[in-house]
Image: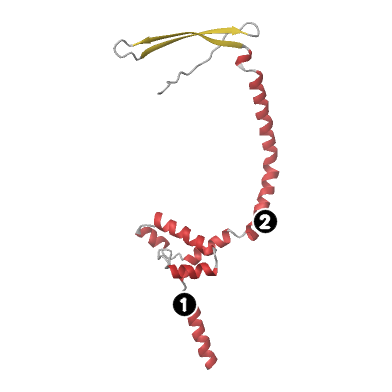
């Protein structure tokens, strides 16, 4: 009888909810927080994440109705599981190997194609075929406020490798701000 009573009292004591079993909408006191952090330091990060989400996202009654049953312990268990490298490490290595087998040949092809076009661009630069010089710069101003009305540019194009039949180029004029 005495053992049964002792067992009943102990089960009642251990069945009581701890601070980690509170809803995430109830902030923990400093003492409760210290108790949980002393048990496991990961709880500090858990509380910071919950506090950030509670203060920024979970601010209305709809969110409380939807997430009200979620406890600090459930969030802690999720974060503990997500950061478990013993479980996820081999899975991640397996994914890395699969990715390497599937995509490394494609990456090598992409590098080869990229190198080909870089070489083509460098071999066919316009500056190898034509020299362009600015030879004329005329500015027309408004009479009433002396602002620039029109700019006339003249370019001299000199072929460097034989005759050039047709050429187009563009230029951009940017205002110099004081």
Residue at 48% from the left image edge and 81% from the top image edge: 13
Residue 102 is situated, as x and y percent measured from the top left of the image, at 68, 43
67 vs 163: above or below: below
Residue 62 is tagged as none
Residue 22 is situated, as x and y percent measured from the top left of the image, at 44, 69
113 vs 20: above or below: above
Seen as rendered, the residue at the extreme front is 178
Residue 90 is tagged as 2
- Which residue is the site of mark 1? 16
Residue sitting nearer the eye, 23 or 153: 153
Residue at 37% from the left image edge and 14% from the top image edge: 148
Q: Is residue 159 left or right of residue 50?
A: right
Judged from the image, the secondary structure of the residue bearing numbered disc 1 is loop
**N-terminal of the two: label 2 or label 1?**
1
Residue 127 is situated, as x and y percent measured from the top left of the image, at 61, 15
Give the color scheme: rainbow, by chain, secondary structure or one colour: secondary structure
Q: Are marks 2 and 1 in contact (CB under 8 Å)?
A: no
Q: Quadrant of the C terminus?
A: top left
Seen as rendered, the residue at the extreme bottom is 1
């Amino acid at each position: 009888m005495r053992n049964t009573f002792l067992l009943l009292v102990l089960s009642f004591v251990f069945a009581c909810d701890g601070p980690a079993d509170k809803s995430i909408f109830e902030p923990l006191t400093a003492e409760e927080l210290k108790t949980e952090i002393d048990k496991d330091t990961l709880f500090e990060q858990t509380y910071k994440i919950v506090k950030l989400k509670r203060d920024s996202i979970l601010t209305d009654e709809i969110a409380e109705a939807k997430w009200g049953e979620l406890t600090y312990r459930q969030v802690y268990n999720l974060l503990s599981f997500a950061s478990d490298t013993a479980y996820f490490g081999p899975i991640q290595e397996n994914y890395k190997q699969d990715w390497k087998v599937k995509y490394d040949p494609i990456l090598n092809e992409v590098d080869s194609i990229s190198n080909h076009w870089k070489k083509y661009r460098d071999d066919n630069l316009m500056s190898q075929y034509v020299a362009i010089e600015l030879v004329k710069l005329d500015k027309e101003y408004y009479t009433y406020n002396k602002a620039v009305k029109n700019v006339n540019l003249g370019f001299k194009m000199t072929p460097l490798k034989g005759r050039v039949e047709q050429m187009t180029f563009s230029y951009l004029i940017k205002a110099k701000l004081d």
